Image (tube, rainbow, N blue to C red):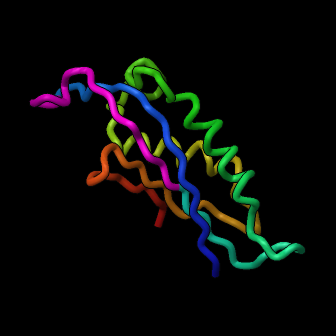
Amino acid sequence: MFELMIETHFASAHQLRGYKGECERVHGHNWKVQVYILAERLNEIDIAIDFHDLKKMTEEIVGQLDHRLLNEIFPFTEKNPSSENIAKWIYDSLRKRIDNDDISLSAVTVWESETASATYFEA
């Protein structure tokens, strides 16, 4: 089994509705996103997936969040744009594009700071 990881970034603002504290006010982060892929076998040129292709797909998805107020983007108009919900949204968006017989999306980790992250995966 092989595990691959790519990393990308985006910047955006959000506010956590119902939060009792500073995070209830609009504030921003420079988010880091890590995407993990599992592969049981390699293709005919001995790679699981081209890193460039994986990063491009991921950047197309997180590009929808870049330099935006996340609370204005569905589903974050209804759900809090927490690190946990952002990780799940990116995971769900990517899974539609990359799962096949040879590779599968393993997890997405979203870092809102150097010391705080949330990971979403399905057991």
**Residue 46 x/y as whole percent:** 82, 76
Q: Which residue sits furthest right?
A: 44
| Residue found at x 69% / y 44% | 56
Q: Quadrant of residue 120?
A: bottom left
Res 93 visible: yes
Q: Is residue 27 magenta?
A: yes
**Does the magenta segment cover residue 67?**
no
| Residue bounds of the magenta highlight | 19-34
| Residue furthest to the bottom | 1
Q: Quadrant of residue 4?
A: bottom right
Residue 25 image position (x, y, % from top left): 20, 21
Judge by depth and name the residue closer to the eye, 112 or 101.
112
Name the residue: 19% across, 30% down: 23
**109 above or below 70?**
below
115 relative position to 63: left or right: left
x%, y% of residue 118? 35, 52
Q: Is residue 77 visible?
A: no
Q: Tell me if residue 9 comes above or below residue 115 in the rendering.
A: above
Horizontally, is 39 left or right of 68 in the view? Answer: right
Please identify the quarter of the rendering in which residue 57 is found. top right
Q: Above or below — where is 123 with respect to 97?
A: below
Task: State the image coordinates of residue 86 (x, y, percent, origin top left).
Answer: 42, 40
* Residue at 33% over, 43% down: 112
For this orientation, the residue located farthest to the left is 20
The foreground one among 51 and 98 is 51
Q: Which one is in front, 13 or 118?
A: 13
The quadrant of the rendering that contains the N terminus is: bottom right
**Residue found 83% across the figure and 72% down from its top:** 43
Residue 8 in the image: above or below residue 119: above
